[in-house]
Image (tube, rainbow, N blue to C red):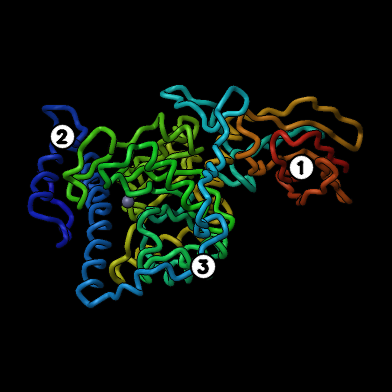
Amino acid sequence: MFTLTPIRLSLTLLALTLSLAACNEQTTQPLNQTPTMASTLEAEDQQAALYDQADSLWYLENERAKRLADGESPTSLMQTTPLPTLQTKREPGDYSFTSPPTPPVSRAGQLLNLPDPGSVPRFTVTGLQWPAQVGDLSISMWAQDKLAAFSLTIDDNHVQDHAFWYEMAEQYGWKWTWFLIANQIGWSSADHWGHWQRALDQGHELQSHGQTHLCDALFYTFREYRQSQVEIERQLANAQVRTLAYPFGMHTDKRGSPCEPLTSERTKNSRAEAAKYFLAGRDVYGALSHPAKLDYMKVPSVSSARNFFNPQAAWAYFDSVFNPASANYRTWYVVHYHNLPNDTAKNEVRQVLAYLQTVEDKVWIAPFTQVAKYGQEYASAKLVNLQKTANSVSFELKDQMNDLWFNQPLTLKLRLPDGWSGVLTVEQQAVNRQVRTLAYQGGVYALFEVIPDRGVVTVKY
Ligand SMILES: [Zn+2]
């Protein structure tokens, strides 16, 4: 029916047979119709996304086997970094238990994440807003009043690619999000907590990809989620684990992976469980979502940025985020990578990043959790108690999200008097916030950032 992209050598023949059978199930065109180019490409994308994640786990497995065959010594399997105080060894006679800090409970007005909007948009998507009257305000849909958002994420613990990702981060000034399999860290000099502390210290985000990647029969789903969160926060200074990449994707598709035989219900993903511990969850297959219909507990992600440059692949074509006629207009584009096995794979990443740099004035490029916070604050935000004078405006910015977790500032835009130039101050709880002005079609506007639910904001101009 269609040709598959070259099959990776690491897949077993059995997995390949199963996957090919699945192609038929997953094609989306109605019966009795010739598959369109788009539907064929999309079905290929789904298969490729599946191969990517199975490949990634086989890669880690094979590397481990190689290290053992090469005589990895017991000493190299020891923890190579000093453990933080929380993990210091118990003294004889100490029978205490210290429970980890529990996540807040989601409740009205203090939500940990937004409910799935289904087919009902949470807001109307428009172009950039330009408030009409002096003193009028608008909330920007994305930070810095950009049109769209982009996040780059990396799954599984591919320490061997760190140097490449650091080099890219340095070149462009952007930060990535790694989703970690917690129980794989610390057992070998090839993947220990020191590697990840470095990533965190360089400003990248580290989040959860489960405790065992749903590959341990003894682990219930909630422990996959919860224990990985606790473990990473205990082991690393300044880690805040608030988002999850579902191992094997939302539907726990283990085909072709080393964990395929493990099929019990309790080793499957659950949106309801994840929503108790995380503010957002990332899937593995990415048909972009309308930005007002995004389920933040099931954020689509494009594997290896496949079809990023392909206008015929509407579900993954990056420039569709700039097209007002597209359902993807102004959406959040998330990609995920696994291991980068060769220069071809690295060059594909370089091309994507080089392109993003050319549109950076229109795209907010930020780690996954930051964008997930912004999007949910924005979707539930309101300006209240607005008071204007001739040269000032004061107001409160409120949202429905939990105030402990949701601390991402939203960008606001204020209309200033025409021809205005002078000194402008923005103050929230006696803290001055940065502000910049811009001109648009004869009007002057101020852009500044405000954290929701942190009290009255006063702008003087
Ligand atoms: Zn994975």
CA–CA distance between discs 1 and 2?
55 Å
Q: Residues within 10 Å of mark 3 (few under 14, many from 20)?
A: few
Marks counted in the figure total: 3
Vertical position of residue 40 compared to residue 181: above or below: above
Label 3 CB-ligand 1 distance < 8 A? no
Q: Position of residue 260 (x, y in %)?
A: 18, 46
The residue tagged with tag 1: helix, strand or loop? strand
The residue carrying mark 1 is: 443
The residue carrying mark 2 is: 25
Q: Position of residue 331 (x, y in %)?
A: 48, 40
Q: Residue at 57% of width from left, 59% of height from top?
A: 85
Amino acid type, label 3? Pro
Left or right position of 147 against 328: right
The residue carrying mark 3 is: 82
Pointer 1 or 2: first along the chain: 2
Q: Examine the rendering and report whether any part of residue 458 can be seen.
A: yes
Q: Residues within 10 Å of mark 1 (few under 14, many from 20)?
A: some
Where, quadrant-wise, is the C terminus in this rendering?
A: top right
Vertical position of residue 332 compared to residue 106: above or below: below
- Residue sitting at the far front: 93
Where, quadrant-wise, is the N terminus in this rendering?
A: top left
- Residue sitting at the far right: 390
Left or right position of 26 against 82: left
Q: Nearer the viewer, residue 105 or 244?
A: 105
